[in-house]
Image (cartoon, rainbow, N blue to C red):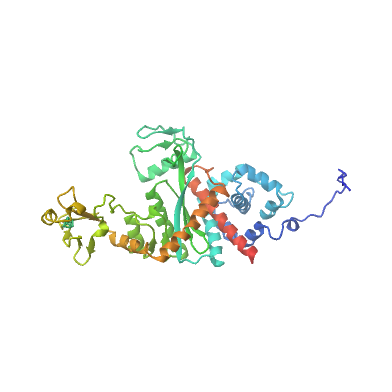
Amino acid sequence: MMGQQSGIQEQLFFCFSLENHVPKDHLLRGIHRLLDLGDFRQQLAGFYSPIGRPSIDPELMIRMLILGYCFGIRSERRLCEEVHLNLAYRWFCRLDLDDPVPDHSTFSKNRHGRFRESQAFRLLFETVLQRCMAEGLVKGEGFATDASIIKADAQRQRRVEDGETVDWGDSEQASRPVREYLAALEEINDPKEPTRTLSLTDPAATWTAAPGGPAFFAYCTNYLIDLEAGIILDVEASKVNKAAEVDATRTMIDRVEEKFDLKPERLVGDTNYGSAAMLGWLVDEKGIEPHVPVFDKSERTDGTFGRSDFTFDADNNRYICPAGKFLKTSWRTKKKDPLRYRASQYDCLACPLKEQCCPNTLNRKIVRSPFESARDVARAITKTEAYKQSRKERKKVEMLFAHLKRILRLGKLRLRGFSGALDEFLLAATCPKSKANGEKVDNE
Ligand code: SF4
């Protein structure tokens, strides 16, 4: 028989508990069980006045932000609406049915004020990481690093090209990202005009050309992950260029070692991290195996001898060529980086292999970076089985970026400036860890 609702809601009083309406296996229950924000409140205490009207609980705002980034709700206005209407979200935020939800403007006030000054998002990120470590999700044997480009919230049209002068006007009246940018310039005390395309909305963003599309303004999010369970150990925001990405990786490796006493035996990365200086830093300074392809232009494509055809004799600081002659460097050479090794003209002109070696010059020359021994270590690693395994494991960091863009919907930033980008990257990186923890608890 077809039923029909009476349309009359006669009952005046209900006995209702949010606790009973959130399923036992809901992801938010797993996250809640492992989310301890006790330290967080203490850290923020100094940034609140001891007198006056009580503010909105910072823990509530952080819970709402975690929720938003876990479920891809990045608009603060929509997040407030969702928390207002969704029972599970209310339960996670420790709100009762008739408790008011904070206004969306409260978020931006706190984000750009107390939360940023107190480094609240990094503290939250590290709190969740420590929990992952306590749960045995971090092994510390192998790390992987990579960077991904995220569009900035800056229109392409509002820009000035290289060499054009920019009048920023009264810095007091400028927008927050412009003020931050000018303060950073002031700090490095660099009076010269920037020689790059600048956004007038978000000058710290990098103008970058993506393959197959028009150029746009963007930042890079850099991840350092542990390869055991793909847990993100550190996050850094950087400009979009190789040098900045390498610097970000160094910063992250040092920070993780300093804060958590974690130093990997191997670091896995792509060719961007295979520069001579980076390999030298990894091998000589840090003692970390670089499972990274060497950035190498020494091999030739015209059929003549490449550098691998020459043997380096470290004891005598010279190269031995395929004809058995020596290439030496002069102690008088002023430029030591890279060092230049030359064969004798006398040997080369009389050599039967000259056409295969240096057909267009009188003698053969080879350059050697001061970090060449580290590059040799990296080259030797690329021939091992462990390296093949590392290449497969590197996909874990790529998957995290795919997750960041598709599931967490961080294809474009909402906040501007370097600090805004870092805030968003930290929150977005906290959520996969929260989920990993939550899922682990659920599975148990
Ligand atoms: S050309 Fe010179 S460097 Fe090249 S193989 Fe002959 S002797 Fe050696």
Closer to the camera, 189 or 75?
75
Residue 207, located in which quarter of the rendered image? top left
Q: Residue at x 18, y 65 (%)?
A: 316
Residue lying at 63% horizontally and 64% vertically, measured from the top left: 441
Q: Residue furthest front?
A: 352
Picture layout, residue 185 above or below residue 260? above
Left or right: where 79 falls relative to 239: right
Residue 425 visible in the shown view: yes
Q: Position of residue 345 (x, y in %)?
A: 12, 54
Position of 213 relative to 241 (above/below): above
Q: Quadrant of the C terminus?
A: bottom right
Q: Can the viewer see residue 256?
A: no
* Residue 77 placement (x, y as % from top left): 63, 42
Up/down of 337 relative to 202, above or below: below
Name above or below for residue 200 compared with residue 336.
above
Q: Nearer the viewer, residue 187 or 412?
A: 412
Residue 346 sits in quarter? bottom left
Q: Can you give x and y, in whole percent of width and height, for residue 405 in the image?
A: 54, 48
Callout count: 0
Q: Quadrant of ligand 1?
A: bottom left
Q: Position of residue 112 (x, y in %)?
A: 53, 45
Q: Foreground residue, 177 or 296?
A: 296
